[in-house]
Amino acid sequence: MKALITGGGGFLGSHLTEAWLARGGEAVVLDDFSTGREENLDACRRDPRLRIVNGSVLDAALVGRLVGEADLVFHFAAVVGVRLVIRDPIRTLETNFVGARHVLDAGARLGKKILFASTSEVYGKAPGGAFVEDSDLVLGAPTIGRWGYACSKALAEFYAFAQAKRQGLRFVALRCFNAVGVRQIPDHGMVLPRFVRQAVAGEPLTVFGDGSQSRCFMHVADAVEATLRLANAPDAERQIVNVGNPESVTMLDLARRVIRLAGSRSTILHVDPREVYDTDFADMPSRIPDVSRLERLTGFRPRRGVEEAVREMIAGAL
């Protein structure tokens, strides 16, 4: 079975590519390597069942041709990371929605199933405990650049449902909650690789505000396993599914854990995020997924904790 994996040179996409090949499939990776890295595919680059296409999801003709050649499509190409999203909002909106539209249109036209990566960011500022897939979305003002990312992903979800009604598109929307692990880099604003890099270097770990805000982190191996199981779950089609680990940790506790696991002498430095991101920064006190739908559809529940990912990232220095 041949899969097209857009964004296959990225952090999550490269792990997915390796897992797909390990299970005996063929893979075509489409990536322009603007945020992904070619070296992420070093472990499988020489596999004869892998073809790497250096190109963009904004090239509709290329996307259509590659979707037509595939049996299944994983759409993971996107602009991600708070720093990059805020710095280049036009690129964020264009890549994340127009690119998704090209993939979804091709899937609808050619009868191919699409699994595409959305994000927990679409829940926005919605209050309450664990987020359920049918929860209302409460997004911030358009004057805050960060919300453009959430809107671009939410619009792709709306478009997928519209294409399902119009042309019978088969799809699964994966709302991903902070997948972490080796190969993830801090350059675009990801917190855990930033902490790991700072701890390994003996630098202060920069915690925004008082560090009481909490997040949930899913080991990349669990994220890939959940994705592959959803690909084989007929009842998941035309549904949104949270892909995350409900174990929550505050940023201050996470920083302390990283220092301990790294055996580092680093200290913790509390900073005002507006000094880093200017006025475009917005933060939420917590973001926890309800994963009962994932478990019901696939029988899978995340098994690995955040500390396992931290140990691996420290051992590999990212």
Image (cartoon, grey):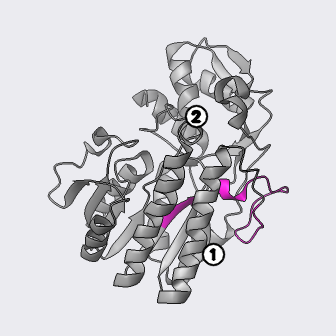
Describe the element under mark 2 as helix, strand or loop: helix
| Mark 2 nearby-residue class (10 Å; few <14, some 14–19, many ≥20) | many
Q: Is residue 24 left or right of residue 106?
A: left
Is residue 123 within the magenta segment? yes
Relative to 175, say whether 282 is above or below: above
Front tag of 2 and 1: 2
Q: Amino acid at mark 1?
A: Arg
Which residues are the magenta region?
116-137
Q: Position of residue 213 (x, y in %)?
A: 77, 38
- Please tell me which residue is depicted at 44% across the width and 38% down the height of the picture: 182
Front residue of this view, candidates 228 and 177: 177
**Residue indicated by mark 1:** 296
Q: Is residue 314 left or right of residue 15?
A: right
- Please tell me which residue is depicted at 72% across the width and 45% down the height of the picture: 143
Describe the element under mark 1 as helix, strand or loop: helix
Q: Between marks 2 and 1, how big is the CA–CA gap?
A: 29 Å
Quadrant, the N terminus: bottom left
Q: Main secondary structure of the magenta part?
A: loop
> Which of the 4 quarters of the picture holds residue 89?
top right
Mark before the other along the chain sequence, 2 or 1: 2
Front residue of this view, candidates 75 and 248: 75
- Please tell me which residue is depicted at 73% across the width and 72% down the height of the picture: 134
Relative to 281, say whether 172 is above or below: below
- Please tell me which residue is depicted at 40% across the width and 30% down the height of the picture: 316
